[in-house]
Amino acid sequence: MPPQLDDRRPTITPQLARRVALLGGIAFVLFAALFFRLWFLQVLSGDDYVSQAAQNRVRKIRIEAPRGDVVDRNDRTLIKTRQAAVVQILPSELPQAERTLAAQYGSQVSASERRRLAAGDRLDRLDRERRRSGRRITRIQRRERHRLLRASRKAQRVAIPALPADPSVKRLYRRLGRVLNVSPRTIHKRVVQQVAQTPYAAVTVKTDIGLAAFNYLKERQERFPGVEPEIQYLRDYPYKAIGAHLFGTLREISPRELKRKRYRGISQGERIGAGGIEQSYDRYLRGQDGYYRQVVDALGQPCDDPVRCAVRRVKPQQGQQLKLTLDLRLQRAGQAALAGAVPAGAGGGFVAMDPRNGDILGMGSYPSFDANLFAKPISQERYDRLNSDAEGKPLLDRAIAGVYPTGSTFKPITAVAALQSGLVTPSTLVDDPGSFKLGPQTFKNAGDAVNGSIDIVKALEVSSDVFFYKLGYRMYSQKGQVLQTWARRLGLGRKTGVDLPGEFAGLVPDRHWRDGAFNRYEKCRKRRGLGYQSQAALFACGGVDRPYSGGDNVQLAVGQGDLQATPLQMATAYAAVANGGRVVEPHLGAEVEDGQGRLLQRLRFPTRRKVDLSASTRATILRGLRLAASAPDGTSADVFKGVPLEVYGKTGTAERGNGDADQSWYVAYVPNKSRPIVVAVTVEKGGFGAEAAAPAACRILTNWFDLPGSDCSAGSSTTN
Amino acid sequence: MSVHTPIKPASEPPAPLVPRGLRLRIDPLLTLAAVGLLVCSVYALNGATGDDVPGHPNYYVYRQIAFGGVGLVLMYGVSRLDYSRLRELKYPLYGFMIFSIVVVWLLGTASKGSKRWIETPLFNLQPSELGKVLLVVSLAGFLVDRLRRPGRDTTVRLVLLALLPAMLVMAEPDLGSALVYLAAVVALLFVAGVPWRHFALLGALGGVAIALTLVALPAAGVDVLKPYQTDRLTSFLHPSDVAGKEGYQQQQSKIAIGSGEKTGRGVAKATQTGLDFLPEHHTDFIYAVVGETFGFAGAALILSLYALLIWRGLHILTQAKNLFGALLAGGLTLTLFFQIFVNVGMTVGIMPITGIPAPLLSYGGSSMLVTFLALGLLQSVHAQARETALTKSRAPVL
């Protein structure tokens, strides 16, 4: 047999054969691994990847929903929404040169701030060393101290860097500036400042540009790289300064807030209410943003192929309408009355409230500001001005955040405490010889009046200080701090719970507070080696330089001393006396409505607590308040002379110290079957209660009861 | 063949079934696999690259067809030569390889941060690709010479000979080619029968080197790899971290392949490819394009063609008429396999991203022609083996 061809194959060594077999085995195993991996990806988890691919290419683009309107109790629109064109620049699209400049500017600003803090630290160190050495200050030291003081007050301004040399930046700003009527330099400044603050957020160059400019930019986007003209919703306040303090504003949600439960469902870049009812009722006012799904490629460019790229759209839903308890007409009258009563350079606040349920009918602060300022981004300079002492801090809402001693308007509260604790009865007579001696101190009636033997009704009518000094002192010797307890029960020294952020609690001074503060004062003073009640100790360690004493209670009984209360707290306390002991929760929110004004939800504010106020106590105090506003020697009788109203009112004149003029107060209650009202007015530096606050309160009342012809002249009473 | 044999068989063998003159001089299955892959490549490119070059929807397709055609001719031409002669040319070949890589440094065109190409009027020549074949050929030559004196010495020399070009291309930087070179020398040593303990030693050394480049040296402040290379090599270890660019690419590739499901989404609906989510979809990630567009069916077909290619390569290895041929076949086949596994493994997310193209599938003239050159050499080994088997009754003595 001839050998077969196949048998004549070259033989390979056994070792090579083994190795080749091994290689084949390895290759087989690895190919099998790839096959199984493919099977796993494509067959077993294919669905998952299909949906991932879908997410990949679809971008959800938000369509902002307009916020709901806000109307007053008579459906007059206080806040509405309008569309405005906004021009933004995306920093990521700007040339590197400009972004570098912005980053440099940002680090310079923070370095300047660090220097300011360091100067403050050095100043402290210098003072401490000087005190420790006990030597007198030298001229050089004084000069150094002066320099540090100045440096620590205000951070050095960092100059905005000049426009970058990059011609593309200049060209863009010049072109854009021509369209927007803004100088390239200003655009550059806004970009640099905003990028330094929030590096990735879009920079708003100009808000509320005209339609022509908007369309021009929209049609020539390729000539304006990185510039995004957009339609945004802006708040519009048709009544400008009327109610400005109540509304708050809008701002973009912060990263921290995004994580909070309260803001669930809100995505980055959405605007939320900040301050005022915009914040309190944000969840009603905020609409449901819509979106459209746009198919995009890997670079985020919308795709134009109609097969791959169908677009889906979900319409935005406007927020709900909020109806307030506020009465626009009363609000306007209140602000006008307040503006007329406040002397130049001072401020004031007023509250008008329904004593039955806490509906706030009007609430204002002076000076006020045009709410529309905050509808658009506000410049830092303007904002600083609105917060400055020189302009009287227009942003401060003195109705809820202005805390003052209340003067004699506190007396009805002292009366409640005295009557309810059994210290006096309605018929108890107390001698008022015109002054009250306590140790070395002598407390006198205002105007050196001598009232003789009087009961509590008369004491309220003529606003006898001595009567209440005596009550205050007697309550000091009683256990349990009766006066403070009653003041707190009626709502002082704690927040009223009004539906606005930023409310102040004020202070009802008591033994615990003053002794604690005094202990801190002593500790601080001794640590620094300062003299007792010395000027230096006053600055370094605060003004509480003695423990609680009878004199403090005497002062509190007439609303002086350390007492701090807001007009809203006083209105709430008087409302509780007027309605028989229910401490209401003051509120602005009334109803949530849909866009057509149909009721969706009535907002409820149950009475916060009920205080034990006997009918006779209430009747006694009301009689005193009625006489004070009507009897011939009542403190505010001449203000309400020509006003046909059953006014129950109390004047207040609080001494402010520092040589400032007295703070004028007036709190009044007018019963009415359908529209009872409590009004509290305070006027800084207004003088006597009957002088400034009472006429303003009178004007508010005559407006509320529609008595246009009535004359609310300033009263002549000079009582506290 | 007309070689005169002194011993005459007692009787004439029966006439072969297929006349000798008509016998195929090439391995039909290997050719089938290569042509099949080429067709798949063109088909996939046709669907994926329509929008890539504005105004020329078929730019990549036509060029790939041209490369493939030239490649096929090249393969056939090389298969007609006797590869054994290359053994004598090992020094010039090795020298040419080093020279061409160095020339890239001088004349090369930078692309995406690395210098890999020399521009020619027709296409961009990538010497590191050509090096894959040249290194195998020259190292196989060196090995055959030294195999009479096997020992640690041989292993060390060979590894050093491979390390030189590997370091050079790594500096371009072309990490993928460097890894292929190292794989090639390991494959050659393995086929040559180097003792296991040498591999253990090499493995240990390699482990130390990896630890040094990825961990120790960067910690000491010396960066051997570019940061993106480190990212590539390590990102597949934590695939959920898609924040980085490398993790993103791999994630997109997996999404593309997974979303193809069983039968694929078709060209029009292949959004990962069409909307450019898939990076480098005509070169490194073309396998993911196939996976998305044609699904498991298409991806498995490609994988089967690759398996066929490797099987035939290993088969030719066993048939080689001499050790040089066996080494050549082994080195080339395993080099191809390494590239296939790393590329496909990269697209399915089980291997790091190294920038190795898929042989015969990815768009690219250098890669295509060099792969056909390797296949031509394999065909030559095959053809020579057939010739020898027909004319001799015994294996050549080495």
Image: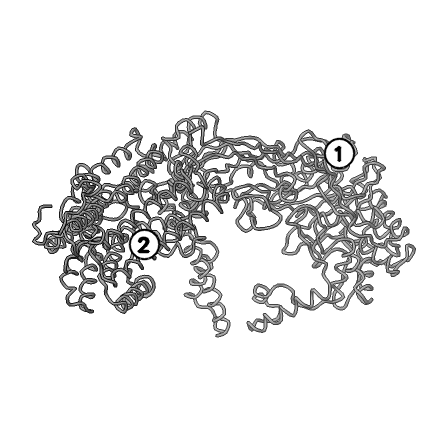
Residue A226, how many percent across, how many down? 39, 37
Q: Which residue is mark 1?
A: A703
User: Numbered disc 1: what chain?
Assistant: A
Asked whether the residues under the numbered discs 1 and 2 touch, taking CB atoms below 8 Å apart as contact, a structural biologist would say no
- Identify whether B105 is placed above or below B152: above
Q: Rate crowding at label 1 as few (under 14), some (14 to 19) or many (20 or more) other CA atoms within 10 Å.
A: some
A344 on left or right of A385:
right
Alpha-carbon span between mark 1 and mark 2: 79 Å
Q: Residue at x 87, y 59 (%)?
A: A431
Residue A669, how many percent across, how many down? 80, 43
Instruction: Work out whether residue A8 or residue A423 is closer to the camera in this orientation and state it.
Output: A8
| Residue B229: numbered disc | 2
Q: Residue at x 37, y 36 (%)?
A: A184
Q: Is residue A618 visible?
A: yes
Quarter occupied by residue A544: bottom right
Tell me the kind of residue under disc 1.
Answer: Asn
Residue A39, how many percent across, how many down? 44, 47
Q: Residue furthest bottom?
A: A133
Q: Residue at x 48, y 37 (%)?
A: A58
SS type, badge 1: helix
Q: Residue furthest right?
A: A427
Quarter occupied by residue B60: top left
Q: Is residue A158 visible?
A: no
Residue B157, how many percent across, how many down? 17, 64
Instruction: Work out whether residue B70 or residue A303 is closer to the camera in this orientation and state it.
Output: B70
Tell me the kind of residue under disc 2.
Answer: Gln
A535 on left or right of A114:
right
Q: How is the image coloured?
A: one colour
SS type, badge 2: helix
